[in-house]
Image (spheres, helix red, strand yellow):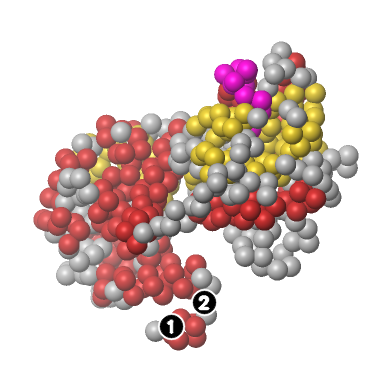
Amino acid sequence: MKIALAQANPVVGDIAGNLERLLTWLNDCHRRCDLLVFPELYLSGYPPRDLLSVPSFIDRLEAAVEEIVASSRQLPDTGLLFGVPRRSAESSLFNSALLIGGGRILLEQHKALLPDYDVFDESRYFVPASRHRVVDFAGHRLGICICEDAWNLPEFRPQGRYQQNPVEQLVKAGAEAIINLSASPFHQGKGQVRRQIAQSHARRHKTAFVLVNQVGANDELIFDGGSFVLRADGTLAGSLPEFEESLEVLELLEPAARRKPPKRSPKEAEGEAKEEIVRVRKALVLGTRDYFIKTGVKTALVGLSGGIDSSVVAAVAAEALGPTQVYGVTLPGPYSSTGSVNDSARLANNLGIHFETLPITDVFRCYLDVLDPLFQARPADLTEENIQARIRGGLLMALANKFGHLLLATSNKSEMAVGYATLYGDMTGALAVIADLFKGQVYELAHDYNSECEIIPDAILTKPPSAELRLDQKDSDSLPAYDLLDAILKLYIEQRKSLDQIVAAG
C-alpha cells in the first residue's frame, strides 16, 4: 500500500489557501498513491484557538469539506485523510480526522485525548471521542488517531491523566497499521521522543505506524515536521525532512526489516548532541521566516548593541529573510564603547545587511533636563539606565512604523526569567526570536554561525556581557555568572524543581 505523507505548512484561518494546497497535492498524487495524509486540523491550521468559537468559521470549514468530497469523485483512485474541526449533533466541536474517497466520507474519527497542559488548551474547545473504530481501506484495516491519542504510554505520560488508550483500542479492533495525524510543536529533543513513542507502539502491538506532523510556525509555536513510517518491528521505512514542507510517497506495510538497529558509537552520540543546536537554528529560522510570510511583512529591523544577543538575532533574520531584507541600527549612548559600535558595523558587513548609526546621547540629555525639576537632584539609579533603553525602543519603533519593518526583540530566556530587561525598551518588538534560548545556548548558536567563517565578530563572543547603560557596567554586577544562572533556571523553569531541590543539587 502506497501512502503519501503531506507534511504541510498551513496558515491558521486561511481555509481557502489551505484547501487550495490540499487539492493541488491531491491532483499531484493521484494514481501515484493509495492514500494521501495531511496533519491534524490541517484545514483550519493549528492552533485555531478562538476562531473555533466563530460560527461562520465552522460554516466555511464545512463548505470546504463538501468541496473536497466533490473533488474526490473525480479522483477515485486515491483516498484523502486530513484533520478538521467538526460539529457534533449537540453543536459542540470535535477535533476530527476525515477519510474521504470516491465522493464519500469513509470515516470520521474524533480525537479522544485532549491535552490542556503546556501550550495546549484543547479541552476548552473540543469534546473527546467516545470510541475508536478501524476502517477497511485499499485491502487493509487502518486505525486512525490524532496526535495526543498516541502519547498515553506510562513511560511518557503520568498515570491517571487519561482513562483510555486509543492505540490499544484500535489494535484490539484489528488495525494492521496506525496512522497518526499530528500538530506537535518543536522543542529540543521532541523529534526523538515522537519517534520513541511510535516505535514503542509498533513493537508492542506488531503494527506499522505512520505519523504525519505539521511543519511551519504560527506565532510563538514552531512545528518541525519530521514525519515518518515505521515497520511493524519499529524500524524506519521512510521519513521526511525536518523544518521544511515535503510531500513523499512511501510504502506502508512493507516486510519488516530482519536486522537489529545498529548501536551508536560514542562519537556518533557526540555528533547527535552537536546536531541539536543545528535543529534549534533551523527552528528559529523557520519561525522567523514564517512569521514574516504569514503577516505579509517583508523587512526586519534589529537594534544592534554590539552584544551577543542582537548579533545572533540579526544572523537568524538574515538567514530567514535574506540579508537585503534586514536593517540593523546601532544607537550609541553616553556609555556605549567605541568597540561596540565598531563590532556592530563589522557584524552588519559580515552579514551583508543594511546598517545605520543613530546616536541617542543628545536625546537622553533632553530627557534628563525635562525631568530634573521633578527628580530634585536625586542621584542617578536604575531610572536613568531604563530611560536609555526606552529611548532606543521608541526610536526603533519609529523607524519600523515609517518604513514598514517588523522590529525584532533581542532578549534571551535567562534575562527574561529574572527581569533583566526594560519594559518598553529592549523588550520592544513584534517577535522575540531568542526568548526561549538560555544565554549559554545563544553562545552555542553564535559558534554554529561561525563554524565555517567568521560571521559574528570574535570580539562580540569574548567580551564580558554588558547593557552599557552606566559607566563600566557588566551583567555580572546584577546577575550570577550565566552558566550558574542557566543551570538554576533550567532546574526551576523546565524541570519544576523547588528551591530546596535546587540547593540540594549544588
Write the start and end of the magenta stretch as one range.
Answer: 26-43
Is the C terminus in the top left, top right, bottom left or bottom right quadrant?
bottom left
Which of pointers 2 and 1 indicates the residue nearer the eye?
1
Find out whether the residues at labels 2 and 1 contact each other: C-beta distance under 8 Å. Answer: yes
| Magenta stretch, main secondary structure class | loop
Is residue 44 rendered magenta in the image?
no
Looking at the picture, tell me which residue is in the foreground, 84 or 173: 173
Is the N terminus in the top left, top right, bottom left or bottom right quadrant?
top right
At 59% from the left edge and 32% from the top edge, which residue is drawn? 251
Residue at label 1? Answer: 505
At 66% from the left edge and 65% from the top edge, which residue is drawn? 154
Residue 284, given in percent of the width and then of the height, sits at: 40, 46
First along the sequence among labels 2 and 1: 2
Amino acid identity at mark 1: Ala
Looking at the picture, tell me which residue is in the foreground, 447 or 251: 251
Residue 16, given in percent of the width and then of the height, sits at: 63, 24
Amino acid identity at mark 2: Lys
The count of marks equals 2
Is residue 38 rendered magenta in the image?
yes
Give the crowd class for mark 1: few <14, some 14-19, many >=20 residues within 10 Å. Answer: few
The vertical placement of 432 against 402, above or below, is below
Identify the disc placed on residue 497: 2
Identify the disc placed on residue 207: none
Question: On the image, which quarter does residue 339 sit in?
Answer: bottom left
Residue at the farthest right position: 89
Q: CA distance from mark 2 to mark 1?
A: 10 Å
Residue 219, given in percent of the width and then of the height, sits at: 51, 44
**Left or right: residue 441 compared with residue 238:** left
Residue at the farthest front position: 258
At 74% from the left edge and 34% from the top edge, which residue is drawn? 140
**Left or right: residue 423 compared with residue 145:** left
Q: Would you say residue 299 is visible in this rendering?
A: yes
